[in-house]
Image (spheres, grey):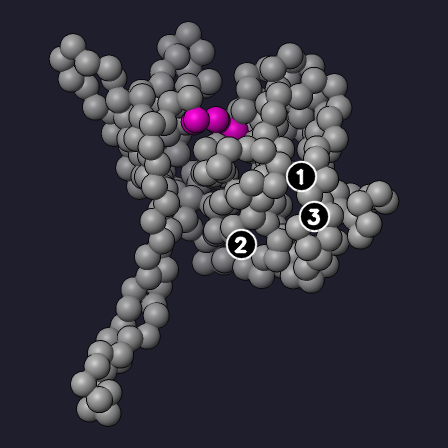
Amino acid sequence: ILCNGFDLSAYLQSFDVPRDQDLKDATTFASNGFKEFVPGVQEISVKGEGFYGDNPSADSNSADYLFNAMFGAGNTGLLTIMPEGGTAGNRALIMNSVLAKYQVNIKVADLLMALFEAKATGANGALTGVFARGISLMYQTVTGSVNGSTIDNGATSVGWCANAHNSNSDGTLTVKVQHSSNGSVWADLITFGGALASKTAAQSVDTTTTVNRYRRSIVSAIGGTTNKASVGFASPYAG
């Protein structure tokens, strides 16, 4: 599970992704004795529990710094969740979020623990990047340039939602997603707008463009020795 370029996997012991929606009572005299409902507003959350993560000598590299920085207006979190692990082709959940809760639990003679809750949100009322079910295209340490595995995920005609993270503390990454109709001739689909600095993330959303059958990520490390790239990609995505 990654948020804004931070890999939280080493801290968390559990996480949940509940998805709820309001149900509006539409029962009438003609409902034949059964309740009738109309779906309303949806809510998607991520709730995680695990160890408290702090690093006073390098505060900006700590999980505690990440969560405290997410409070306040306009401070959203780009989340990528890979429930089965980050192997290319595995499920990835991609979402924009706002932090609802961050709590540090302190007990005598016990380990420091923490929990957080984030909720999916749009951008100024738009649906862009709220939540998408996709696949992992890469989750690995990169030195030099790496071509990710080719994934046959089916051609689509309705865009994409993708997140990319650089989750280590030195160097930068350039990240591309490419697509192909035959698995051998490739074209760039996403470039994520330039180099990703350490502990940062970027998102790309398109709701109209055709995506060819095969996908892969291309990642190049610039400086540093421990650049870890994570790429989640969902298509189709109509907003």
Q: Which mark is residue 192?
A: 1
Residue placed most toward the observer, 122 or 146: 146
Q: Is residue 51 magenta?
A: no
Three-letter code, disc 1:
Phe
**Disc 3 and disc 1: Cα gap in Å?**
22 Å
Please report whichever mark, 3 or 2, sits nearer to the chain's N-terminal start: 2
Instruction: State which mark lies toward you, 3 or 2.
Output: 3
Q: Secondary structure at mark 1?
A: loop
Give x and y (percent) for residue 191.
71, 39
Residue assigned mark 3: 152
Residue that badge 2 annotates: 128
Q: Specify the principal SS of the magenta part.
A: loop
In the figure, 29 relative to 159: above or below? below
| Front disc: 3 or 1 | 3
Q: Which range is magenta? A: 5-9
Name the residue at 36% across, 18% down: 53
Quadrant in which residue 187 is drawn: top right
Badge 2 or badge 1: first in the primary sequence: 2
Q: Is residue 181 left or right of residue 116?
A: right
| Dot 3 crowding, Cα within 10 Å, few <14, some 14–19, many 20+ | some
